[in-house]
Amino acid sequence: MLVINQDECIDCAACVTFCPVDAIINEQDPGGADWVQINRQYGDEWPSISKKGPPPADAKSWEGVTDKFEKHFRALPADR
């Protein structure tokens, strides 16, 4: 899981276009406001990604899985 640092985001929506699985929603969309606090907390705690890397080996298996946050979220950043 990746989060967006709320203090660095300039609301350009470029990330929405580049997300390969439509996982990013606008905070104005239904359910979007819930992600603002999650992004704010973990965007400050987790390390920043400064360059694109390969997707995780199991990325395809997670496409379309529902309730991922509720069922699988860990507060620790992934090892990258």
Image (tube, rainbow, N blue to C red):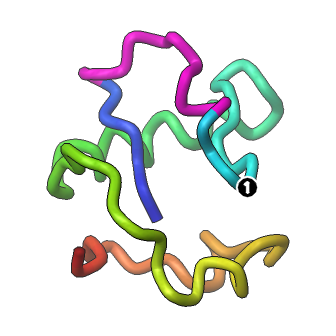
Q: Position of residue 49 (x, y in %)?
A: 23, 50
Q: Which residues are magenta?
A: 7-17
Nearer the observer, 76 or 60: 60
Q: Is residue 33 magenta?
A: no
Q: Is residue 15 magenta?
A: yes
Q: Position of residue 67 (x, y in %)?
A: 75, 73
The residue at the point 72 percent across, 87 percent down is 61
Q: Residues within 10 Å of mark 1 (few under 14, many from 20)?
A: few
Which quadrant is home to the C terminus?
bottom left
Q: Position of residue 54 (x, y in %)?
A: 40, 69
Type of amino acid at the residue the image marks with label 1: Val
Task: Decide if residue 59 is on the left or right side of residue 29.
Answer: left
Please, is residue 36 above or below residue 47 in the view? above
Considering the whole magenta stretch, tell me its main secondary structure.
Answer: loop
The residue at the point 57 percent across, 84 percent down is 72
Residue to which mark 1 is pinned:
21
Please, is residue 6 above or below residue 3 in the view? above
Q: Secondary structure at mark 1?
A: loop
Task: Decide if residue 7 is on the left or right side of residue 70.
Answer: left
The residue at the point 54 percent across, 32 percent down is 15
Q: Position of residue 51 (x, y in %)?
A: 24, 47
